[in-house]
Image: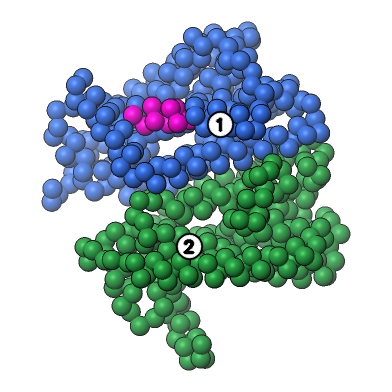
Chain colours: A blue, B green
Amino acid sequence: MQCYFQIFIVTLKEYFAYRLNFVLWRLRMILSTLITLFLWMGVFDSHSSFGSYSKDRLLSYLLYSSLVTAFIASSRVSSLAAEIQNGGIMNLLLKPFSIFGYYAATDAADKLTNVFFGLIEFSLIIYFFKIPLVAPQQIGWFLLFLVSAVCISFSINLMLSFVGFWTPEVWAPRFLFLMLVTFVSGAYFPLDLLPPLAYRILLFTPFPYLYFMPTKILIDGVQNAYFIQQIACSLGWAIGLFYLAQIVWKKGIKDFSFWGR
Amino acid sequence: MTNITMQHNLKIFLLFAKNALRVTTQGRLGIIIFTLGKIVRFTFMFFLLFFIFSKTRVLKGYTFQEAALFYMIFNLIDTISQILFREVYRFRTLVASGSLDTILLKPYHPFLRILIGGVDVMDVILLIPYTLIAFYFALQGHIIFIHFVSFFVLFLNAIWLATSFHIIVLALGIITTEVDHTILIYRDMTSLGRFPMAIYKEPIRSIFTFIIPIGVMTSFPPQALLGTLSLSGLLFSFVISSILFYGAMSLWNFALKRYQSWGG
């Protein structure tokens, strides 16, 4: 555990090596939250509600979703693809820790940084733009969905990086996935605003359990009759995708070869 | 610049463009997946606009057709910028490795290589549907000839502004190696232009119109096409682009004087 803790600390320190870079990165995060927020605030200029969401609930959803997204989407696993391509993974394999553990530790540092500064940015946005915020509900269930979402995201990111074992095109699939997941996981709007059939179909995929479901629990708590099914789906995807990632890893490392290092 | 110099520069530009095309077409699977990703992004963002307008007739005074026109013109400006200036995304590597030296030593302006030397032909494919969709929404409104002319002039002005922004990114890439992703900061700022500037609150709206003229770049052309841009707005846009270009070139010259190579 000590070595993973050291990996965690070193990753944290890396962020503050380039301070200007770090500040500009946080500025980008604030900008991207503000764009979506302003768009929806414009909608509520002439309406008091949008579908089943009041102004307070929808704006709260967007703000909480930005925090949840910052926590879940932040990941260093994408660098694994480059390590596979340039052979750097061999250095990692020779070390006395597991690859999965290594990237879990770096991800943990990334998530801690994002959530710490995300909370500051969150507070600044609420303060300066006077956003009415709904109080968070049922933190316990929220944390369960959050942990499940982290596992789903980690496994998917790993598998996207493992593509590097078989093709040099590692960024293109990740780009396509990012574009897809941004919209179907509820980062821009609550997915239950979609037509019911589309919403029910989406619930069979892992995407709503990334950002939408944890945020929905935070806004509304446990309200609907399908809650047990949703927990089962979320945990099922988390466990299933993790095992799938392990299978893909074993297949990839068996096929992998490199030279010159 | 003499005619011979311009011909010479054009020849170099075409040579770089041909090489860039050769490099791009080596990874065919990548081209397909990237293009698909861009189509997905465009489609979903368009769907978001449509989804919002399915439950509201106007957004800050703009109808769906007008908001869609803003979005399409933003896409056209953004895509053309990416086609022309893709090489800027690879600039930091040149600085960090010292390869910039070899470029500065060549008998042509370095911008031919580092600014427009990596034309991205993948995005050219998407220009066609973007243009057709923009025309469709433009024809929904009452567009008169003078509006179209002012739109066209402001569209060129927007590309000029984008050029200045990219030169600033290049200059910052030399001045400070502390910034990994200057170009991504530029992209995030320009993404504000997806929607009419009117939706943003103050001081964001003023900052991104008068200080960092993203609004001039992305909102003024569709406003001109819709006939809602005043003459003073039109004149202001040329003044701001001249000032920005002058500032960008001054910053670039300053960066070059400060440049110290290493590693090459």
Q: What residue do we see at 64% from left, 59% from top? A: B217
Say which amino acid is labelled 1. Answer: Leu
Q: In this picture, is A230 found above or below B131?
A: above
Q: Is residue A45 magenta?
A: no
Q: Residues within 10 Å of mark 1 (few under 14, many from 20)?
A: few
Q: Position of residue A256 (x, y in %)?
A: 21, 41
Classify B175 as above or below A157: below
Q: Is residue A234 above or below residue B243?
A: above
Residues at discs 2 and 1 both on one chain: no
Q: Residue drawn 63% across and 9% down? A: A223
Q: Is residue B197 left or right of residue B55?
A: left
Quarter of the figure that contains the N terminus of chain A: top left
Question: In the rendering, which numbered label is found on residue B115?
Answer: none
What secondary structure is the magenta-colored segment mainly? Answer: helix
Q: Nearer the viewer, mark 2 or mark 1?
A: 1
The residue carrying mark 1 is: A124
Spot occupied by residue B71 in the image (x, y as percentages of width and height): 68, 51
What residue appears at the point 35 percent right and 70 percent down from the top-left corner? Answer: B257
Name the residue at 26% across, 43% down: A83
In space, the residues marked 2 and 1 are separated at their CA atoms by 29 Å
- Asked whether the viewer can see residue A197, the reply is no
Q: Determine if residue A127 is in view.
A: yes
**B103 left or right, relative to B233:** left
Residue B169 x/y as whole percent = 46, 60
The magenta stretch spans which residues?
Answer: A109-118
Judging from the image, what secondary structure is the residue with disc 2 in? Answer: helix
To which quarter of the image does residue A174 belong?
Answer: top left
- Mark 2 surroundings within 10 Å by alpha-carbon count, few (fewer than 14), some (14 through 19), many (20 or more): many
Q: At which x and y percent is residue A110?
A: 37, 32
What residue does disc 2 label? B168
- Amino acid identity at mark 2: Ile
Circle 1: element type: helix
